[in-house]
Structure formats: C-alpha cells, structure tokens
Amino acid sequence: MLKKVLIANRGEIAVRVARAARSLGIRTVAVYSDADAGALHPRLADEAVRIGPAEARLSYLDGARLLAAARETGADALHPGYGFLSQDPDFADACAAAGLAFVGPPGDCMRVMGQKVPARRAMAAAGVPVVPGNLDPLADAADALRVAAEVGYPVMLKASAGGGGKGIRLVRSAEGMASAFDRARSESEAAFGRGDLYIEKAVDRPRHVEVQVVADHHGSVVAVGERECSVQRRHQKVLEECPANRLPERTRRGVAEAAVRAAAAIGYRNAGTVEFLVDDAGEFWFLEMNTRIQVEHPVTEEVFGLDLVREQLLVAGGERLSFSAGGLRPRGHALEARICAEDPEEGFLPSTGVVAHLEVPAGPGVRFDGAVFEGMEVGLHYDPLLGKLVCWGPDRPAALARMRTALDGFTLAGVRTTIPFLRRLLDHPGFVEGVYDTGFLEGPGKPLLSPSPRGDLDLVAAVAAVLHRRARPARAAAPAAGPSPWVQAGRREAMNGGGPR
C-alpha cells in the first residue's frame, strides 16, 4: 500500500485525488503555484509545497520541480491527475527512475497511444476496428490528396499528436485540401511542437462513445461501462452521460470487448479510456486512447458504485482490482455537466473575477466535484473548468429532471459561467430524446449557442442574492481562512507548525 502521494495537479482533480487518498489512509502532498497560494487543494492536503510562479511551464509543467517536491516530502507515489504532465511518457519514466509509483500507465503505453498514427497502427494489429485512412504520417499536401482520393471525401485531417480539438480540419473536396493542410499543420505545431498529420474517412453523423478501462499488475483488464460524449463544442466535450443512450446491445458489448483488447495489446496498467466513433447503424471504430483518468469519470462511478481514483491508487501500490467484470452491475443513469468560467454570450470566452457568492446544489443523486469557493479569484492562467455537476437517477428521464433542478439551484456570482447554456441544453428536444451526434451544436442545437434571453435575469438574481446575504445581521467573525484543525494537526510534524510553503 502507498504511504504518501504527491498530487501533481491543481483545482478540482487535486481535491478529488486528495479525498480518495485519505479514504485509504494515504497521506497527501499538494503542490501550488503563486496563483494558487490561496486555493482549496493546498489547504486540504496534509502538506503543501510551492513549485513556482503562475505560468504553468514554470510550475505545474516543471517535472524536475515536481520530482524535487516529492523527494523533499518523502512521497512514494505521484498522481498526475489529467492535463499538464499526465500523459507525458518521459515524466512517467522519470518518476519510475526516482523510485516513485506513477499513478498511471507505463511511459511506453503513453508513447504508443500519445501519437495517433502509431496508435492506429497498433490497434489495427490488435484487431480493433480503425477508421479507414493512412497508418503513416503524411509527407505533404500532395500526399494528403493521394490518401483522400483513396479513402473518399469527405475526410478528417488530424494532428498525430492531437488532443483537445487542436489540429483538426474537415475536408470535403480536393479543392480545400491545401489550405486545410497548412492550417492544421500550423495549429498542431503551435499546440504540440510537431506538425505530423494523418487522414481518416469522415464518419457521417458520428457519435463519440468511450469505454472506461482499469487494469492491474496481475493480468486483470476490466471494461467499466461506456459513456456518451457526443455533445461537443469545437471538438471539446460539454456534457457526458453513462450509459450511452440508444446504443444497440451488440455495439455496447463490441466496444467493451474492443477496449479490453486495446488495453491488453499494449500492456496497459491503471485507469484509461478507449474512445470510439459510432455510426447510426451501430458500427464502431477506434478513435484514440486517453492514458489517464478522464474529466468525466464521475458518471461511471455513479452508475457502477465505484471510486475509480481509489482503484488507481490501489493498482499503483501493487494491489489487485477490488472488482471483476462479472461483478459489475450498472444501476440507473448519470449525467455530468462541466461548469466553466466562460461567457456563453461572448463566444465562450474565458471569464475572470472574484467569486462573490456561491450556492452549490445538493440532495439525493446530486454530486459536485469542484474546488471553487466564495472569495476565490478566477484568473486566466489555467483551464476555465470550475467543477463538474453530476446527477444520478434510476433512469435517464429522472437523471435529466434532477440535473435541471440542480442547475436551477446553482448560483455562482462574480464570474460568468456556462450554467445558463447547460440549462438550455437540457430542454432541447433533440437532447431530451437522446437523438444527437457530435455535430449537434453545429446543427439542431446551434441556437443554444446564441445569447440567452434569460442571461440578464440570471445575473440580476445572482446579484440580488449577494446583496441579500450582505444585508443580514452581522454574525460573529469567522476564523481566518486556512487549513482546518484536522489538517493542521496532520501537518505539525511535517511542516514544523507552518502553513503552505
């Protein structure tokens, strides 16, 4: 069993990992940049170490500084969360070389799956269906034209090192290939430091369905259901569901079996997600594998009654999985809405400010994974994700009703958020019926991206709530912000009585 884990991340995922570790009796070390000195995650951990200025490359992306923090605090494991260095194979190898258990897969697994072309080649060799296209990087635009002519238009031009919707272009004809190739290559070089591209046949009206897998060091590889992730804006997920709705049973079984085969083929360990494109007929093809815990993992947890981060820590410590495929019993339906500091009325531009008032919904079947609090400053240094609202119900209509009620009761004043947009999404007939694909927000759901007529009313209501709270009779002064007494007690020896350093 692990004894102390350094959490090499921030925000809601750092809080999530800290709580899972505490449930296992594992001590935690948080790291924080100057921008996060007053954040929640360093206050919840047993120890906290400053790792640099606000700029991510000088703090959360500084692998050497993270490893130094692990040595200084005597950590025997490192959890990378998602984003930052979570899918950096060299960093995973460096952790192993430093004697740290990396809470994720081996670096070699990341190398195979981190580049889309080698991943497609490996999956084809393992018998996992892949979208028709090329299995080698394109030499130039002329090479792209040749492959596209063989595959047939329309095609998707994609960055081999891609992710987050970067370096992707839909090409409908040969006339548009040259400019699309240049734009995709330029975007890929800017985002990933390399411009390798490949081509896939564009699947008509595809759905994005992903399978959660977990593998231990004792030969067990288990698929833990699937998630529907087709509501996307600019190739980035907005809302997820578990299980995927309207999925033929043969397809449900097929993607699960293919995901297990994919993970086993590369000797995968720990938690990961195998993603597929699914067409109207239920045919499916491998898209990519995310070699880390996913942002949307809570919907799977709610349906299967698991703590996936806990399983990650157990596996990293050499333990066997606490469950088997035969013992998994899905129950009900769950949705996850990403609450982001973005302004839907201004093209989803990031929103900054200080959280003046916060009321988080609660009740049966309602969960919020976040690290936001009143008085928190929301800046531009990092991803705008504030937290994830997860609602479970005995069936999809019940989960939808619970999510609507939860969003109606979610108040966050001081910064613009995606809450009004998400609330409108839940009332759209196409979404309510579950008839949607990855083009939903560019087609039938496009009006949802327009300014909301309720936007000003939402703002007025939030401001009124703040004024009402401030008008209440004064109460006794609250204790100064900082670690709670139980955290301080755990820190005294390690921190010599100090706060975050």
Image (cartoon, helix red, strand yellow):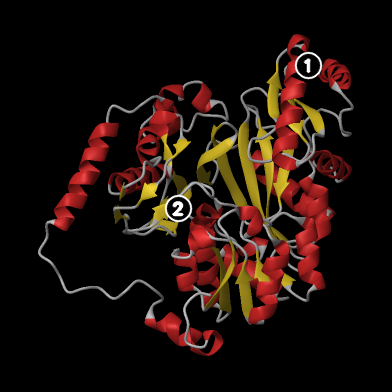
Q: In the image, what residue occupies the spot 69% across and 29% down? A: 168
Where is 405 relative to 477, above or below?
A: above
Q: In this image, 468 relative to 59: left or right?
A: left
Q: In this image, 406 relative to 172: left or right?
A: left
Where is 182 relative to 255, above or below?
A: above
Badge 2 element = strand
Q: Quadrant of residue 181?
A: top right
Give percent across and percent down for residue 361. Answer: 31, 54
Q: Residue furthest bottom?
A: 493
Give percent across and percent down for residue 142. Answer: 88, 17
Earlier in the chain: of badge 1 and badge 2, it is 1
- Residue 268 appears in the picture as rendered: no
Q: In this image, 347 relative to 149: left or right?
A: left
Q: Residue furthest left?
A: 473
Camera-side residue of 332 and 493: 493
Residue designated by label 1: 178
Q: In the image, what residue occupies the spot 73% across and 20% down? A: 180
* Mark 1 vs mark 2, CA separation in Å: 40 Å
Q: In this image, 406 relative to 202: left or right?
A: left
